[in-house]
Image (spheres, rainbow, N blue to C red):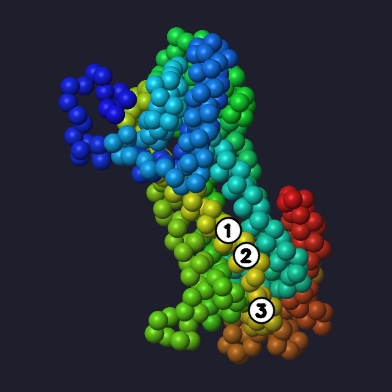
Amino acid sequence: MSKLWGGRFTKPTDKLVEEYTSSIGFDVKLALQDIQGSKAHVEMLGKCSIISEDEAAQIKEGLQTIEKKIENDDVEFSVEDEDIHMNIEKLLIEEIGPVGGKLHTGRSRNDQVATDMHLYLKEKTKQLIGLVEAVQKSLADQAEQHVDTIIPGYTHLQRAQPVSFAHHLLAYFWMFERDKERLQDSMKRIDWSPLGAAALAGTPYPVDRKMTAEALGFENVYPNSLDAVSDRDFILEFLSISSILITHISRLSEELILWSSQEFNFVELDDAFCTGSSIMPQKKNPDVPELLRGKTGRIYGNLMGLLTLLKGLPLAYNKDMQEDKEGMFDTVETLDGALSLLAPMLASMEVKGANMRQAVNEDYSNATDIADYLAVKGLPFREAHSVIGQVVLYAIEQGKYLLDLKLEEYQQFSELFEKDIYEKLAPDHVVAARASEGGTGFEQVKEQLALAKKHIN
């Protein structure tokens, strides 16, 4: 069979052109969405008397047959037929005869592919929201077990102040909560139907766009046919949200890599999420978080690729827009894999609370509390800060930590020091003292955890 659009042409397409311009190699992922859109379209054609009810029934039955074959992996798609739309239409004509050619009445591949992508991204965004929530649940479950576990808190990757490990984990919970909310909000832009906009200007047939939108589960219909076929904002938004999401995954992965190193030894990842060395038998490599961190670049690249693709395109459809799909598919699949691995990896992670506590005991991260201690006793904070700097320097020179210093050593620097300084410097007291809203105080963390649980099903 000749090409479905070949009437105007006098010679066949060059084979190299066919191979270069064909998109069936990747847009085959839209096969089921394409059939879903076609079913809604042909049902509308029949009800609006654009084709006969009998013809609509034949076409719908043929589409269902092809759909089953695709689900059973019993279809061979052809490069010569360019894309998923033409492949399915050709299969339909082979299945039911020339009446299959009436399916394309009142539409174009331009509104057809846009509809397919809206359907695809709507489905995948819902799935990703569920996967993000599974990660949040793992974080919340670990946090619940480690409210009283204390870990050094860092700034500049230098020990700063001790914090509840649950507090640290919940910081990521809220990052993922914002990601989830962004995905949920993006559904407002995805949930629009382009079908019926045709090539760019609409169609002379009396189509009912609201009927097809309702059949496909869309909330809205694009009010402008040019915008309907050329809009890729919904994909840009998805890629942007995905870039922020993978940034959070990468930051958490970096911490897991650091924490599981021998230098930190704060956690141990389950063997199921690590690999070994081909030459060094003692090695246990955190390959999964390393790859999660590494995948960040490709998702950023997909966003930059589409931004660059669209920046100079005039309205409406241009062949350049064939390049809008692979980055979307790749980002969906990359995030699906990343989130699917991250949730069970976090859930199975062993937390080495004793090592965390030892690290807190062997640093100077409680120094700020001495400054606060002196400030409460009337010394201006800036002067107290200077005094504590001298105390820390003295302790370092003596090879001691702050809790190791004797009272008379403290009193060399200020007469305001009394015996209660040791209670103030105890790690549990230091953490508990941060009782301001959103702080790392144990009671505050429990309240935060209760709030977090309300955000997951």
Task: Report the amino acid beneath label 1.
Answer: Ser
The image shows residue 348 at horizontal and vertical percentages of 65, 70
Identify the secondary structure beneath mark 1.
helix
Q: Residue at x 55, y 44 (%)?
A: 124
Q: Which of the two discs, 3 and 1, labels the residue nearer the N terminus?
A: 1
Q: Residue at x 43, y 80 (%)?
A: 277
Q: Residue at x 30, y 23 (%)?
A: 5
Q: CA distance from mark 3 to mark 1?
A: 24 Å
Task: Report the amino acid beneath label 2.
Answer: Pro
Identify the secondary structure beneath mark 3.
loop
Q: Which residue is mark 3?
A: 352
Q: Which of the two discs, 2 and 3, labels the residue nearer the N terminus?
A: 2
Taking depth in this image into account, of 103 and 344 the one nearest to the observer is 103
Q: Quadrant of the N terminus?
A: top left
Q: CA distance from mark 2 to mark 1?
A: 7 Å
Task: Report the amino acid beneath label 3.
Answer: Lys
Identify the secondary structure beneath mark 2.
helix
Q: Is residue 265 visible in the rendered structure shown here?
A: yes
Mark linked to residue 340: 1
Taking depth in this image into account, of 76 and 220 the one nearest to the observer is 76
The image shows residue 372 at horizontal and vertical percentages of 73, 68
Q: Is disc 2 surrounded by few (<14), some (14 to 19) or many (20+) residues within 10 Å?
A: some
Mark linked to residue 344: 2
Res. 93 image quadrant: top left
Q: Is residue 456 left or right of residue 15?
A: right
Q: Is disc 1 surrounded by few (<14), some (14 to 19) or many (20+) residues within 10 Å?
A: some
The image shows residue 238 at horizontal and vertical percentages of 51, 41
Mark linked to residue 371: none
Q: CA distance from mark 2 to mark 3?
A: 18 Å
Q: Is residue 44 above or below residue 20?
A: above
